[in-house]
Amino acid sequence: MAYNFDQLHDRLNSDAIKWKYYDADVLPLWVADMDFQAPPAVIDALHRRVDAGIFGYPQEDPQLSQVVASRMAERYGWQIQPEDVLLAPGVVVGFNWVCHALAEPGEAVLIQPPVYPPFFGAPGNAGLVRQEAPLSIKPDGSYAIDFDAFERSIDANTRVFILCNPHNPVGRVFTPAELQRLAQICLDHNVWICSDEIHADLVFQGHPHTPIASLSPEIAHHTATLIAPSKTYNIPGLGCSFIIAQNPEIRNRLRSHQQGLVGHVNLLGQVGALAAYQHGDEWLAAMLAYLEANRDYLCTTVQQYMPEINMACPEGTYLAWLDCRQAGLAPNPYEFFLKEAKVALNDGSQFGTQGDGFVRLNFGCPRATLTEALERMYTALARRRPASAE
């Protein structure tokens, strides 16, 4: 089946925060929401449910846990059981839920900035202390883990490590060797691992995703893994995610902290998730090829026409992390591109102090949208260059 990812959709009247937050003359390439229609199978399944016309309280569909277990085995060689899978109304809810369940007030949660902004608030939401072990940046703009610094960041109070892999915003897909070393440090210090793997399906050629819990039974025993169809199939508004925990203790702790706080997944979220996982992979393969071409176009354009900006091509996700620190953009790159180019990106400072001078760009959009945004950005940069630099 052919899919038209070049099709432009009018999202100004779609109640999408991505397109409604800024003025109509601003091109939004910020929040992680793609401008592609969901797979036809998802749309059809939702239509059938809506046409039934009854929207009572749903029972958790037992097919979902089975489909998740089968998917982990088929895509990653990770053997889990359906009973290892819990439903959650979102991944952000999920890692907040894990923090409440696996740590006591006053204990600490470790994160690796620059990282997805809600990571910063999760420890405090549970009465915990936030600790940071920043990723290190290389001259080419790519990122690596400083394992010695990571281990030094752990102390007697550290109880949970929240991993982001594939990493948002830096685009790394960590290798099995990197994950093994991270996991071993956590095991040595009796630290639970909460692995946000929401972008697991969105990886490019040469960079396969490895669930950290798939590395060994011992690591799995200490890990809660968060996944969702939301980014993969562009259905974040349906609010359906999963926590995979092979350790019954983790599952029991999560259930005991759920009562009255963590709601069930809504009816349409379950319907959409099941249809996506059962019938959406042909669409996913086509979409990934389109995203990879967008990524390559973006990397080439930045390198050729925006020499002031440094970026490494993402290994996964549809998010690019642009280092504008040498460009001297005032008052900051986010404000510069918003005002001078009418392009809305994410302000890097929201991802931690390590993001100062950076912006995050969402290339999950039709090529025409990406092209126009890059042309606006290039033109804004060109206007401030000396004539001799052209």
Image: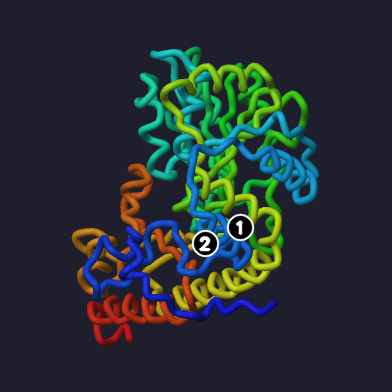
Where is residue 291 drawn, in percent x and y? 57, 69
| Residue closest to the eye, 44 or 189 | 44
Where is residue 260 drawn, in percent x and y? 42, 22
Question: At numbered mark 2, what does the secondary structure look like: helix, strand or loop?
Answer: loop
Is 110 left, or right, of 324 in this rendering? Answer: right
In the image, residue 190 sits, relative to residue 74, either above or below, namely above
Taking the spot 61% from the left edge, 32% from the top edge, the residue there is 86
Where is residue 80 drawn, in percent x and y? 76, 34
Question: At numbered mark 1, what does the secondary structure look like: helix, strand or loop?
Answer: loop
Please give the residue where the numbered disc 1 appears in the rendered image: 202
Q: Amino acid at mark 2?
A: Tyr
Residue found at the very far front of the displayed protein: 53
Q: Earlier in the sequence, mark 2 or mark 1?
A: 1
| Residue closest to the eye, 260 or 305 | 260
Q: Is label 2 in contact with label 1 (beta carbons under 8 Å)?
A: yes
Quarter of the image with the C terminus in it: bottom left
**How far apart, in angstroms, are the residues tagged by discs 2 and 1?**
7 Å
Is 286 left, or right, of 160 in this rendering? Answer: right
Please give the residue where the numbered disc 2 appears in the rendered image: 318
